[in-house]
């Protein structure tokens, strides 16, 4: 009875089902061990303990503006410190450096004779040195004699005064450093003198060094009233004294003659 109870059909079915489930779980675990993800994780190198973190990547440098490019080119030339400093002080809003112009930049020697304290005249002079088109040196060399170049100043032009074998001159000023900076937006040429705007057209006269102030008469002290006096007419020195002396001599002579005549009459 006991043996027949242990091997009854219902119990055998449950044992068989449990065996099948266990086998399925074992197969699934084995397949998971062979998966690509697990293999990749196992193949990855372990991080080194104490290794330095990678350095951060620096951002790319900020591109230079047109103003910064021109000022850098003038400074690199070595003898344009005055105008490069002036352009720096004007900043990005300057009307001197802008797209579509040509700048004829006077060097330090040209600036030495100018009154840098006269900002209005100085800016007008610089505006006169800005042509309203882009000209590299080769293009300037092809311009005919006596042709004109428009500037930033209304109705004021630059005159081509010399070409060919005599050399290129603008308002009789030679270009000493051609193509200091040239691109499609602007051209910069160095010159060794300030262009004489008054001589070649109706432009302004370049500002020269300020003259010394004229000496003036000192003003009277506060509260002191001064009365203008009429100047005296000068007479020759010694005129009055000489006439009196002559008259005295004549009288003395007449008295002496009268005395002598009286004595002779008595004798």
Image (cartoon, rainbow, N blue to C red):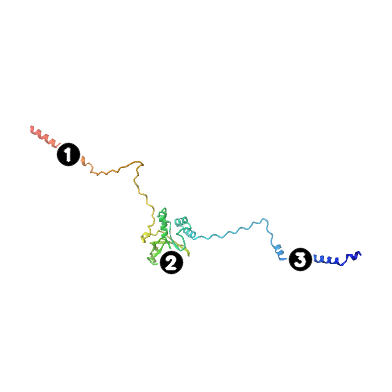
Residue beneath the point at 8% across and 33% down:
265
Q: Give the foreground label among 1 and 3.
A: 3
Residue beneath the point at 85% across and 66% down:
10
| Side of 173 relative to 256 (left or right) | right
Q: Nearer the viewer, residue 209 or 11?
A: 11
Residue beneath the point at 21% across and 40% down:
240
Q: Which mark is residue 139?
A: 2
Is residue 109 visible in the rendered structure shown here?
A: no
Is residue 127 visible in the rendered structure shown here?
A: yes
- Mark 2 nearby-residue class (10 Å; few <14, some 14–19, many ≥20): few
Q: CA distance from mark 2 to mark 1?
A: 95 Å
SS type, badge 2: helix
- Residue assigned mark 1: 247
Q: Nearer the viewer, residue 55 or 230?
A: 230
Q: Nearer the viewer, residue 61 or 173?
A: 61
| Side of 85 relative to 27 (left or right) | left
Where the C terminus falls, by quadrant?
top left
SS type, badge 3: helix
**Residue 147 drawn at (x, y percent):** 38, 66
**Residue 71 drawn at (x, y percent):** 48, 58
- Residue assigned mark 3: 28
Q: Which mark is residue 210?
A: none
- Mark 3 nearby-residue class (10 Å; few <14, some 14–19, many ≥20): few
Residue extending furthest toward the top: 266
Residue beneath the point at 76% across and 65% down:
28
Q: Give the foreground label among 3 and 2.
A: 3
Where the N terminus falls, by quadrant?
bottom right
């Amino acid at each position: 009875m006991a043996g027949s109870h242990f091997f009854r059909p219902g119990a055998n079915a449950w044992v068989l089902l449990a065996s099948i489930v266990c086998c399925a779980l074992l197969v699934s675990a084995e397949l998971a061990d062979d998966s690509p993800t697990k293999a990749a994780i196992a193949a990855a190198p372990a991080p080194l303990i104490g290794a330095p973190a990678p350095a951060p990547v620096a951002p790319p440098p900020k591109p230079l503006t047109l103003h910064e490019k021109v000022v850098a080119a003038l400074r690199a030339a070595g003898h344009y410190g005055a105008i490069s400093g002036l352009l720096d002080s004007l900043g990005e809003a300057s009307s001197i450096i802008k797209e579509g112009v040509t700048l004829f930049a006077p060097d330090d020697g040209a600036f030495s004779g100018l009154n840098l304290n006269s900002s209005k005249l100085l800016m007008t002079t610089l505006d006169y040195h800005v042509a309203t088109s882009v000209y590299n040196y080769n293009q300037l060399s092809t311009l005919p004699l006596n042709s004109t170049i428009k500037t930033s100043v209304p109705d004021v032009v630059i005159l081509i005064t010399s070409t060919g074998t005599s050399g290129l001159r603008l308002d009789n000023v030679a270009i000493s450093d051609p193509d200091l900076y040239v691109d499609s937006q602007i051209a910069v040429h160095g010159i060794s003198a300030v262009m004489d705007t008054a001589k070649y057209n109706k432009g302004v006269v370049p500002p020269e060094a300020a003259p010394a102030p004229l000496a003036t008469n000192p003003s009277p002290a506060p509260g002191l009233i001064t009365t203008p006096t009429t100047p005296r007419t000068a007479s020759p020195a010694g005129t009055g004294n000489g006439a009196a002396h002559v008259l005295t001599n004549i009288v003395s002579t007449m008295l002496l003659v009268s005395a002598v005549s009286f004595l002779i009459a008595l004798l």
